[in-house]
Image (spheres, helix red, strand yellow):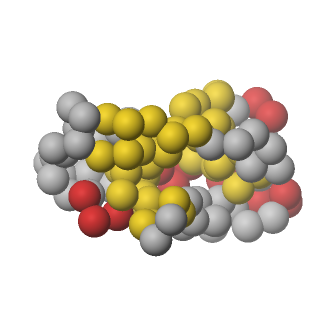
Amino acid sequence: MALERGPLVYCLEEADNPGDLDGVVLDSSTAPTVRERPDLLGGVTTIVASGRRLTPDGIGWWPYPTSPAHIRHADQSQPVELTAVPYYAWANRGNGAMRVWIPRRS
């Protein structure tokens, strides 16, 4: 799933979401919230959503889980707060991973 607000597409960046972004799953059972961040990248609106960081065993051989079968150990994973920035603003805070498409868990 991708996060959008109005005409803007958002992405997760490693700068805001430390760790392996391939092991992150969006929790689609809770609604994301919008936060104004005047201190970030000259002032942007971010989207904050609940997610889970899967254990390496929970990811399986394919890094993008697309079905419950791929998320074997999601219940044993750690809850995380995910922060997404507008896609146009990424890659301005150093090297790091980025994701637009985020696996979801309902």
x and y, in percent, of residue 19 in the image: 41, 39
Residue found at x 46% / y 71%: 7
Residue found at x 70% / y 43%: 31
Left or right: 70 in relation to 53: right
x and y, in percent, of residue 26 in the image: 65, 48
Which quarter of the picture shows residue 78? Answer: top right
Whether residue 14 is visible, yes or no, is no
Quadrant containing the N terminus in the rendered view: bottom right
Q: Is residue 79 above or below residue 15?
A: above
Left or right: 58 in relation to 8: right
Whether residue 34 is visible, yes or no, is yes
Left or right: 47 in relation to 31: left
x and y, in percent, of residue 63 in the image: 58, 62
Residue found at x 28% / y 65%: 88
Most extreme residue toward the bottom, as rendered?
Answer: 7
In this view of the protein, which residue sits in the foreground, 95 or 43?
Answer: 43
Residue found at x 51% / y 55%: 22
Q: Is residue 40 above or below residue 3?
A: above
Which quarter of the picture shows residue 61? Answer: bottom right
